[in-house]
Image: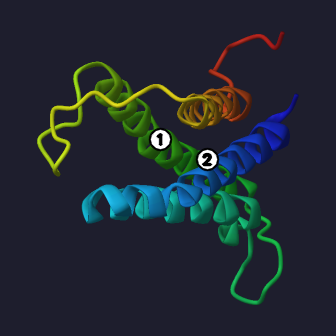
């Protein structure tokens, strides 16, 4: 698999996780508006992130042509991957906390431990896959170290 494959996987995994979050907004709104808003924000950010990473608007110059400076495009891609990792890792950590210690200090169910469901595990697997794809993308696109011999 090459960098483009990892980038596409990352984008589609983000969209899939966001779609699952969006399907759970109503249920969480019924529990408490704050939980629903959290799921809505997670959905919007994950779906939006995936779409933006598929389109990669930074590839285009001001005239609508493809940029010829591959270094600048690659740098923007790498920063965007880091943003995706940074947004999804806390979601996995929060899920682990809510399934072991309980919902942190907010809402009517604060302190209650949430059940582990197949849907929640699937969502976390998608987010973990996104992070792994991101790390592999970063590895595939890193510049060779000076003096390093190619494999």
Mark 2 and mark 1 residues within 8 Å of each other at the beta carbon: yes
For this rendering, which residue is in front, 115 or 53? Answer: 115
105 displayed left or right of 7: left
The residue to which callout 1 is attached is 88
Residue 78 location, quadrant: top right
Q: Measured from the top left, where is residue 147 in percent x and y?
A: 67, 14
Q: CA distance from mark 2 to mark 1?
A: 10 Å
For this rendering, which residue is in front, 79 or 47? Answer: 47
The residue to which callout 2 is attached is 17
Q: Please, what secondary structure does the residue beneath circle 2 have?
A: helix
Q: Measured from the top left, where is residue 126 in percent x and y?
A: 64, 35
10 displayed left or right of 43: right
- Who's the residue at 72% across and 79% down the image? 61
Q: Measured from the top left, where is residue 117 in percent x and y?
A: 53, 29
Q: Is residue 94 above or below residue 37?
A: above
Is the N terminus in the top left, top right, bottom left or bottom right quadrant?
Answer: top right
Q: Please, what secondary structure does the residue beneath circle 1 have?
A: helix
Is the C terminus in the top left, top right, bottom left or bottom right quadrant?
Answer: top right
Residue 140 location, quadrant: top right
- Who's the residue at 59% across and 58% down the image? 23
Q: Residues within 10 Å of mark 1 (few under 14, many from 20)?
A: many
117 displayed left or right of 137: left
- Who's the residue at 58% across and 32% down the image? 131
Q: Residue furthest right?
A: 1
Residue 86 location, quadrant: top left
Q: Residues within 10 Å of mark 2 (few under 14, many from 20)?
A: many
Total residue callouts: 2
- Who's the residue at 50% across and 61% down the image? 45
N-term-proximal mark, 2 vs 1: 2
Q: Residue furthest front?
A: 30
């Amino acid at each position: 698999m090459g960098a483009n494959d990892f980038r596409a996987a990352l984008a589609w995994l983000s969209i899939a996780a966001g779609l699952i979050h969006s399907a759970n907004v109503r249920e969480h709104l019924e529990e408490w508006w704050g939980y629903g808003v959290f799921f809505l924000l997670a959905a919007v950010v994950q779906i939006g992130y995936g779409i933006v990473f598929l389109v990669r608007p930074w590839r285009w110059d001001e005239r609508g042509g493809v940029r010829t400076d591959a270094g600048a495009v690659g740098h923007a891609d790498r920063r965007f991957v880091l943003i995706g990792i940074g947004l999804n890792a806390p979601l996995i950590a929060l899920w682990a906390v809510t399934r072991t210690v309980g919902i942190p200090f907010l809402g009517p169910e604060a302190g209650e431990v949430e059940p582990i469901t197949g849907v929640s595990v699937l969502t976390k697997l998608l987010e973990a896959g996104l992070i792994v794809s991101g790390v592999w993308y970063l590895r595939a696109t890193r510049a060779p170290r000076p003096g390093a011999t190619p494999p």
